[in-house]
Amino acid sequence: MARDDSLLETNKDYAIGLGRAFGGAVLFAIPLLMTMEMWWLGFSMGRGRLLLFMALNFAILVGLSYFAGFEKTFSWKEDVMDALAAFGVGLVTSALMLTLLAVITLDMTWNEIVGKVALQSVPASIGAMLGRKQLGAEQDTRSEEDRKREAGYGGELFLMMAGALFLAFNVAPTEEMILIAFQMSPLHALALGGASIFLLHVFVYAVGFSGQESRPEGGTFLPTFLHFTVAGYGIALLVSLYVLWTFGRTDGVAPAEIASMVVVLGFPASLGAAMARLVI
Amino acid sequence: MKSDSMHQNGHHSDADQHTPWLEWIAAGAGLLLAVCMFGFIGWQALNDATSPPVITVETTDVDPVAGGYRVMFQARNAGGAAAAQVRIEGTLAVGSRPPEVSSVILDYIPGQSAREGGLFFMQDPRSGNLTLRASGFGKP
């Protein structure tokens, strides 16, 4: 089979990108790989919810591939292929790491092993997708900026959603989320909600991070606040509710308690939403 | 900041023409894994994943140790759903004395899976009548 130079070059490039993807998968998945609730949720959470969560994760991978994949992508086909590769990298990484940490052993049943690996593959595959961006030396920042601009408001909201999901997912499995919600008074919850909105606004629009969103031309405080901060917090709350439901934390719980759990989880979620554009 | 649409046009056409074979392999492997994973979990969802736990306990080993006797057991959950905080209780009746009771709580037993543990007794379980059972569980 004859190959020309450019083909060899792209294969090599792709292999390097794949290596970075593995690095990103390990890096982003480590906190959850070492969280025991994640191991238990892997086999105890509802199978339907796990399937839905993984399908949603795949859709997010395709979207992330568009904005910041481990390869420069140019078409839907490429984005889907990259998402599949990231999914594979995430699965392989979590299977290897869980084996290394003795969380899965050969005397366990397939039900248990597959459940654990499947759930851990979610953060690992997102890490794989972001690996190139975070660990890569030559980033094509300009084309990413172009894409974010082309995607417009919908793209902004998507990135906020992805960021909120990632950070919320990182803390949601722990018992502490529920414990914090239980020991907070309604006043605490209101204060935490206010702090979330304040930080979301300040982090993205007032502090001068690189990759910071610029205010719309001629935009004053109120339109910017309503368009991005309030929308972002809304997304953070919805994502929190979804993640809590996925992990079965809302089953049979009174609405007031759910609301307070959503506010607690909404705090990391809104930080994730604010940071999304800085990271991605 | 102005956008510069020319900055990587050359690269575009190259990559459009040849998708590296490694990319096909990586994406293909990912697709295969994804299909297997979704298929397996989907199959679980449709097959008995939610039937409540049924836990049986059987003794695997009895050994004299310092301070008494150690009974190793295996608790198997034949139901589809996982059980949490499973209490395993062992009752040892030797002669006419009041029975000796030892118990342990296992954090989790996944559906269709087994977990192992041990109980300690003062008297020799082999000389008496030992019964092991799961006395309760919580839903995770």
Image (cartoon, rainbow, N blue to C red):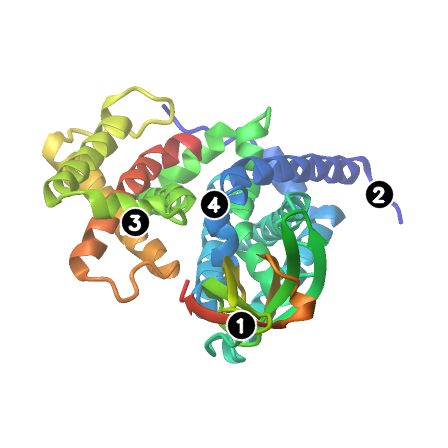
Q: Quadrant of residue A160?
A: top left
Q: Residues within 10 Å of mark 1 (few under 14, many from 20)?
A: some
**Chain ID for label 3?**
A
Q: Which mark is residue B80?
A: none
The three-letter code of the residue at mark 2 reads: Arg
Is there one chain holding both mark 2 and mark 3? Answer: yes
Which residue is the site of mark 2?
A: A3
Please give the residue where the numbered disc 4 appears in the rendered image: A64
Please identify, in this view, whether the residue under mark 4 or under mark 1 is nearer the observer: 1
Q: What amino acid type is highlighted by mark number 3? A: Ile
The chain carrying label 2 is: A
Q: Position of residue A244 (x, y in %)?
A: 33, 55
Q: Nearer the viewer, residue A201 or A266?
A: A266
Which residue position is annotated with label 3? A178
Foreground: disc 2 or disc 1? 1
- For mark 1, what is the residue? B133
Q: Secondary structure at mark 3?
A: helix
Q: Are marks 1 and 3 on the same chain?
A: no
Q: Give the total of numbered labels.
A: 4
Q: Nearer the viewer, mark 2 or mark 3?
A: 3
What chain letter is assigned to the residue under label 1? Answer: B
Pick whichever of labels 2 and 3 is earlier in the sequence.
2
Residue type beneath disc 4? Leu
- The image quadrant that residue A197 belongs to is top left
Q: Nearer the viewer, residue A170 or B131?
A: B131
